[in-house]
Amino acid sequence: MAFDRWCNDHNVQTAPFFDRSGEEFHLVLRAEEIDYINGKVESSTGNPGVFEPGERWVLKGDFFHRAHGFEDYAFQCVDRPGRYKPEVKLQFVHDIASDTTTISLVYPLNNTASGQMQNNPPQSDDGCEDNQNSITEALTDLRWSAINASPWDMAQPEFQLIAGWSSHVVANYLDPTQWRITCLLGTAYSVQQSGSDRFIWTDIWPNVVPGDFDGDGLVDAADETLLSGYVAARDGDPSYDNDATVNGIVACNGFSRYFMLYDVNYDGVIDSDDLPIGPILGDMDISNMVDFEDVADFVLGLLDPDITKRNTMVKSRSFEAISMAMVFLTRAIYRDLLNC
């Protein structure tokens, strides 16, 4: 388990070993991946450069990637070994009634389906994504490459990322209902940042249980022990603690730029307030998460602060503090809408 940015040292041989697990494929929604945008349904009074309510767009580009950790060891494709980033189309459709945007990807499971999509006979699996391509071909490339790897490649630590595919049967992994999906959601900064900062991450799916540090789905004494142990280990260490003082708290080094598992209330400080007890700052509907549903309660609370009494907040967390958290959330949502 990775609990802060220092866990990611880009070395698969050092603990924690979270970087030995992960994905086979990911869908990336970034501007540089877009080849063109075809507005199928456009608002007659809207801005053609902005995706707006009731519209339908089709985007073409290299959005669908096989995990890049395989690239150094996948080599069935002679012309373009390693990389598997087929050109695909994504459809964005906004439904006004439910105020929901649905993003759809139709991608072939095998090259027979790929040929049908192109009105051509199927090609044999060659590991190349610039002709007919499919899930089966991409996984077959991994299996073939793992079996036929050189002794030198097999001796490399990173080879463990692909090694397991040597014994996997590709046909066992073609049922989409059995795939596990994780979503990382974010938006652009409202003001361009210096350096390489381009995104601010706002949410993940499936939702996590706040305070469940060991990932067992429960918030209990074991999680409190992990939090207390982290504070005891990092408190006063200037590499991790910005105040460099042994005072029972850890002031997060690089707060907001980097992640910190134990900063549950996201105030930049790890202390007893992060113990998994009581309501979460900004959780207006007591759902154990701060999300879009809290915005309506926040607006009502601004109009009538007495309404917040229905939320059983601990006394130390005033409505003013809740307001501050919700303002940040509202700004993030506003930017998400602007960048749809």
Image (tube, rainbow, N blue to C red):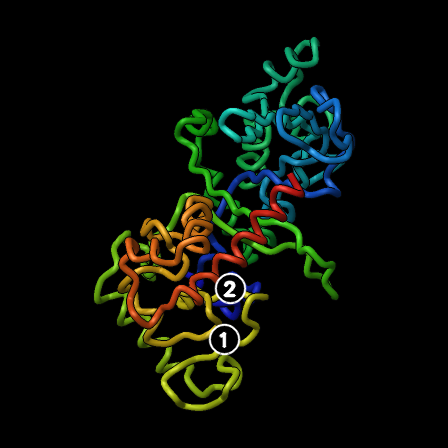
Judging depth in this view, the residue of 157 and 223 nearest the camera is: 223
The Cα–Cα distance between marks 1 and 2, rounded to whole angstroms, is: 9 Å
Image position of 286 (left or right of 156): left
Which residue matches tag 2?
A: 259
Instruction: Spot the residue most to the bottom.
Output: 245
* Count of number-bearing discs: 2
Q: Residues within 10 Å of mark 1 (few under 14, many from 20)?
A: many
Judging depth in this view, the residue of 99 and 20 nearest the camera is: 99
Tell me residue 259's x, y (percent): 51, 64
Q: Secondary structure at mark 2?
A: loop
Q: Secondary structure at mark 1?
A: loop
Image position of 48 (left or right of 124): right
Image position of 303 (left or right of 272): right
Q: Quadrant of residue 278?
A: bottom left
Amino acid type at circle 1 is: Cys
Considering the image in quadrants, where does the C terminus appear? top right
Image position of 133 (left or right of 324): right
- In the figure, 322 relative to 84: above or below? below
Tell me residue 95's x, y (percent): 55, 25
- In the figure, 265 relative to 243: above or below? above
Q: Residue at x 58, y 53 (%)?
A: 331
Tell me residue 83's x, y (percent): 68, 40
Q: Residue at x 28, y 52 (%)?
A: 217
Amino acid type at circle 2 is: Phe
Which residue matches tag 1?
A: 252
